[in-house]
Image (tube, rainbow, N blue to C red):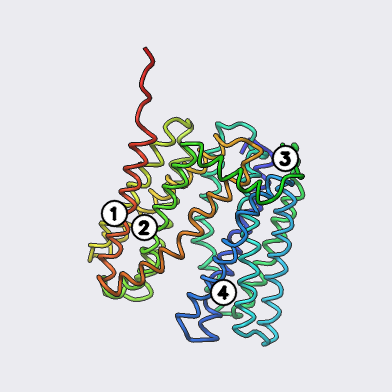
Amino acid sequence: MRWRNYRIYIAGQTVSLVGSFMQMVGISWLVYRLTQSEIALGFYSFLTELSSVAVVLFAGVLADRTNPQNILLSTQILAMLQAFALSVLVFTGRIDIVSVFAFGCFLGLVNGFDAPARHALLPSMVEDQSDFRNAIALYSLALDAARLVGPALAGMLIASWGEGMCFLANGVSYMVVIISLLSLRLKPLQRISVHDNMVRSLSAGIRYVYGHRSIRAVILLVVCVSFGGSSVAVLMPFMAVGVLKGGPQTLGILLASTSLGALAGAFFLGMKGDADGLKHQMGVGACLYGFGTAAFSQSTWLVLSAALLSVAGFGIMIMMASGNTILLSEVEADKRGRVMSLFTLSFMGTVPFGSLCAGILAKLIGSQATIALGAGVCIFGALLFILVCCRPMPSKQ
C-alpha cells in the first residue's frame, strides 16, 4: 500500500468486484426466471467463457503492443455500458433470454481482453518486485471479500427491486474503477514492435513459454489443477443434496467455506513478507487443494465438509497467487501480456472441458468418485511439479 498507484487501483477494484458479483447473481436469477432451465444457466456460462477464450491469446499480444492502462479503460467502459443496458431492458420489461445470451457473449469478449492487460499493468503500479506477492495477495483478498459481500447484497436487491437493480449497481461500480484508472500516474513500459504480425508475435510468446522451464511448469500445473478441480464446482449441488442431505442453505455453507479458506490464504500471503520458496509454496498449495477436495468427496458430515473445503480454498489461493508472482517476476517485460494471456487461458480454457468430463463421469461412477478422481489428478500434477521445479540444483565442483 506504500505505492500510490496501487492504492488507487485496489480501492477502485474492490468496489467494482462487489458490483461484478452482484451482477453474476442477478444474471443467474434472471436466466432461471426467464427459462426455468438449469441447462440455460450452464449454457450462459459456457457462452461467456467461450467468448473469453476465443480472444484471450490475441489480447495478450495487444497488451504487449499497447498501453495496458488504455486497454483496461476501454474494457471497463464497455462493461459499464453493458451493465446499464441490461438494467434498462429489465426495468422496461423488454428483456428476453436471447438478449441475455448476447450480452453474455459481449461481456465474455470484454473479459478476454481485460485479463491479460490487468496482469501486465501490475508491475507498473508496484515497482519493487519484492512487493509483487503482497500486491497479488491483497487483490485476491479483495476478490474473495467481494465474493462474500456481493451475492449477499444482490439477494437483498433482487428481493426488493428485482435483478435490474443489481445491473444498475454494477454499472455505477464501474464508474468508480474508471475514475481510479484515470487517476494513475504510470511510467511507460517497453512495448514490442508494432510491425510484427499478430500471429508471429503470439507464436513468439508461446515459444518463449515453452523454452522457459519454470514458466512452462507453472502453466501446466494450473492446467492440471483447473481440469481436475473443476468437478468440485460442477458437482457441489449434488454433494449438498445427495451426500450431505441438505438443500440451498447447505450449498451456501459449502461455497462460503471455500471463499473463507481463500481469504485465509490471502491473509497468509500478505503477512509472509519474503518471497523465497515460491515454487515450493505453489506445489504445496496445489497438494493442499487436492487432498482437501479428495477428503471432501468422502465426507458425509457438513461440519467436516466445510472444514475440508476451507483447506482446499486455502490451497488454491496459495497456488494461484504464488504462480502469478512467479510469472510476473520472471517474465521479460515486453512478453508479459502474452505470457499472462496463456496463464489466463490455462484455467479459463480448461474449466469448461473439465466440467464436461465431470458431468459425464458422474453419470457413470457417481459424484463422490468423480471428485476424488479429479483430486487425484491435482495431487499427481502437484507432486510432479515439486519433483521437477523444487529439487535443489546440483552444486558445481
Q: Percent position (x, y) of residue 211? A: 51, 37
- Residue 273 is marked as none
Q: Residues within 10 Å of mark 4 (few under 14, many from 20)?
A: many
* Res 103 visible: yes
Give the residue at x 64% y 72%.
167
Q: Residues within 10 Å of mark 1 (few under 14, many from 20)?
A: many
Residue 319 found in image quarter: top left
Report the quarter where the N terminus lies: top right
Name the residue that disc number 4 marks. 26
In the structure shown, which secondary structural element does the residue marked by tag 2 occupy?
helix
Name the residue that disc number 1 marks. 376
Tag 1 and tag 2, C-beta contact below 8 Å = yes
- Residue 228 is marked as 2
User: Measured along the vertical axis of the image, is residue 223 above or below residue 168?
Assistant: above
**Which label's residue is closer to the chain start, 1 or 2?**
2
Q: CA distance from mark 2 to mark 4?
A: 28 Å
- Front-most of 161 and 285? 285
Q: Amino acid at mark 4?
A: Gly
Q: Amino acid at mark 3?
A: Arg
Q: Residues within 10 Å of mark 3 (few under 14, many from 20)?
A: some
Q: CA distance from mark 4 to mark 1?
A: 35 Å
- Front-most of 189 and 10? 189
**Which label's residue is closer to the chain start, 4 or 1?**
4
Give the residue at x 71% y 75%.
85
Q: Percent position (x, y) of residue 59? A: 65, 54
Q: CA distance from mark 2 to mark 3?
A: 36 Å
User: Measured along the vertical axis of the image, is residue 189 above or below residue 91?
Assistant: above
User: Measured along the vertical axis of the image, is residue 352 above or below residue 42?
Assistant: above
Report the quarter where the C terminus lies: top left
**Which label's residue is closer to the chain start, 2 or 3?**
3
**Which label's residue is closer to the chain start, 4 or 3?**
4
